[in-house]
Image (cartoon, helix red, strand yellow):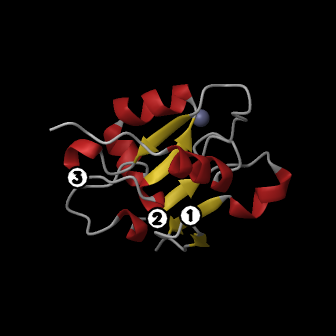
Amino acid sequence: MKKKPLPQRVRDQVQERDGLRCVRCGMSLVIQPRHVHHRLPRSGGGEHVLSNLILLCAKCHATVHNSPRQAREDGYIVSRYADSASRVPLWYAQAHQVSVRSRVGWHVIGDDGQLAAWRKT
Ligand SMILES: [Zn+2]
């Protein structure tokens, strides 16, 4: 079965929401390559919806896939048994972007793409 490519419109929405920065390390991706990562992998049924997509730098994208156990703890990888990525909190680390400093911490992303702070228990 051929997979549908990520629509440009959705890609644009992810980039805008994440402020053109890597969610995991906060690096600016204005010039650096931008990787749109599927939290629930496409092979596991992950879809092109905003709650399932985050912007990563190339290095973090590789780290996430090479360290799946840690990535699951941090919410960058969602188990295929989770009912929705929108319920799985993830760690936002955009520490050095002043305008979104309030984002640093745990968040959930709704299917509308909006972030909500989340307190990890
Ligand atoms: Zn990064």
Q: Position of residue 31 (x, y in %)?
A: 73, 26
Nearest to N terminus: mark 3 or mark 2: 3
Q: What element carries label 2?
A: loop
Q: What element carries label 1?
A: strand
- What separation in Å lies between label 3 and label 2 (alpha carbons)? 19 Å
Label 1 sits on what residue type? Trp
Q: Which numbered tag is attached to residue 106?
A: 1
Residue 65 placement, left or right of 33: left
Q: Is residue 99 above or below residue 23?
A: below
Residue lying farthest right?
98
Q: Do the residues labelled 3 and 1 touch (CB within 8 Å)?
A: no
Q: In which quarter of the image is the N terminus?
A: top left
Amino acid type, mark 2:
Pro
Residue beneath the point at 62% across and 40% down: 22
Residue appearing at x 29%, y 52% in the figure:
46
Q: In which of the image's four quarters is ligand 1 placed?
A: top right
The residue depicted at 46 percent of the width and 46 percent of the height is 7
